[in-house]
Image: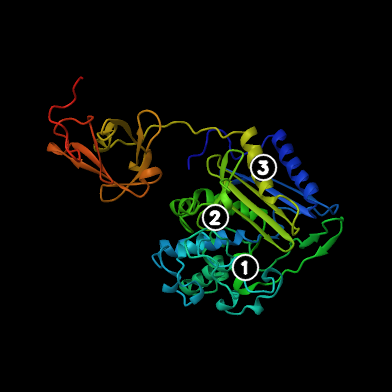
Amino acid sequence: MTTPDVDEFAEPLAATRRALLRRLARGQVEGRAPSLVGAVVREGRLVWTGSRSSVDGSAPDTDTQYRIGSLTKTFVAVLVMRLRDEGLLDLGDPLAKHLDVPEAEGATVAQLLSHTSGLAAEARGPWWERTPGALRPGTADVFGERPLIHPAGRRHHYSNPGFALLGALVERLGGAPWGEVLAHEVLEPLGMGRTSLEPRAPHAGGWAVHPWADVLLPEPAEDTGRMGPAGQLWSTAGDLARFAAFLLDGDDRVLGAESLAEMRAPAVAPEEGDWDGGYGLGTQLVRHGGRFLHGHTGSMPGFLASLWVSAEDRLAGIALANTTSGPAIGTIAADLIRIVAEREPRIPEPWRPLTEVDPALLALTGPWYWGPRAHHLRLRADRGLELSPATGGGRASRFRAEPDGTWTGLDGYYAGETLRVVEGEGGAPAHLDLGTFVFTREPYAPGDVVPGGVDPEGWRAL
């Protein structure tokens, strides 16, 4: 990443900081939270933190641990994607290829990641979030009488046991307990030394707030055992800021940017027609204030958490509270992004020319025609190409250069499709083959290699 000429890493302006603190304070009061911590990450760096507490003189900071609940799922998903990138599994693999779990043998790894496995939402009782994991010692013990609620792949149905199975998958292929694999392969490389399976001081205590009175009740903090991959982790605003930076740009020591982009691509339609939300591969997707955000929310008895990232704004918002319910934790984190983005919009980096020119690539640029429809082909950095209609809407895609001289579509209609250059006499590019579509230098020129042929009389007037 090129460092911007303007210091995007500086803390927000005074008026912005006040607006952020006010939003946090309002969330703590309206949600009646014993404490609430917020943070903003800009361009991969922590630039603002704030907190509110009901106890004078004991406000938490970025080093105070909170339980982060289902944010754990995104960490586990990163581990699964690492296994995929290492060639140890395919996302289309049925779970039965790697684990003997009859209750979910028809579900694929991708379906477990996207909550489309059809598995039940919760583990076998009693309430797994408030009881010891020793009550469910084996993988099969996480299932109740009806482990499968829907046919696999049919619909999005959030499943905590599904992520318990993914944790078991990580253990089987990673050769160690999932928490140890997580620490070695993700937490240590990212410098997240304050993220753990069990609480480490300083940490917040978990509370329930009475719905009709301003009184508190302590909540238990059990080790959930086999259900841990669904929501066991404790973390801090400081550590989650590092994780947010990773989710934005990737880290080759952990997972590359392309795999992270795959995780935040919508995998299924959202539940009950909620078109402002969705789910990728271990990642929640929402629209807030016109922005597309990815990340996750989390809750466990006594705690709420949220982390959202706006890739377009290169911002992330984090909110942590120690109450079972009350604050609109996801909205608070999203509002932290909105406040900074609206008050201090990102300044684009300067346009810069390429550092070198490949004549063969330069010869590909310019107008191409799919039948009579004009398109522009532009040369991007890293030998990439960008194809877009010359006018109006249509099928536009970016393409990544491959070692064999082809290009692979990255987005839009042509995502995953192969673009090939077919050379004519003298080696000059004659036409483009894009998933069987032929793009020529002239619109339907006689003699062009167009499927179905071109009338030899060519264009004519009526």
What residue is shown at x 70% (from left), y 71% (from top)?
222
Report crowding for label 1: few under 14, some 14 to 19, many 20 or more residues within 10 A (C-alpha): some
Q: Are the residues tagged 3 and 2 within 8 Å (C-beta)? A: no
Give the number of the disc on residue 235: none
Q: Are the residues tagged 1 and 2 within 8 Å (C-beta)? A: no
In the picture shown, does residue 6 fall above or below 200? above
- Secondary element under disc 3, as helix, strand or loop, is helix
Apparent side of residue 272 relative to residue 386 in the rendered image (left or right): right
In the picture shown, does residue 289 fall above or below 62? above
What residue is shown at x 30% (from left), y 35% (from top)?
357
The residue that mark 2 highlights is 283
The residue that mark 1 highlights is 122
- Secondary element under disc 1, as helix, strand or loop, is loop
Q: Does label 3 or label 2 sit earlier along the sequence?
A: 2
- Secondary element under disc 2, as helix, strand or loop, is loop
Nearer the observer, disc 1 or disc 2? Answer: 1
Using the image as rendered, state which of residue 425 and residue 184 is in the foreground.
425
Using the image as rendered, state which of residue 365 and residue 30 is in the foreground.
30
Q: Does label 1 or label 2 sit earlier along the sequence?
A: 1
The quadrant of the rendering that contains the C terminus is top left
The residue that mark 3 highlights is 335
Using the image as rendered, state which of residue 273 and residue 342 is in the foreground.
273
Report crowding for label 2: few under 14, some 14 to 19, many 20 or more residues within 10 A (C-alpha): many
Which residue type carries mark 3? Asp
Which residue type carries mark 2? Thr
Nearer the observer, disc 1 or disc 3? Answer: 1
Residue 203 x, y percent position in the rendering: 73, 62
Residue 135 x, y percent position in the rendering: 66, 79
Q: Does label 1 or label 3 sit earlier along the sequence?
A: 1
Apparent side of residue 241 relative to residue 247 in the rendered image (left or right): right
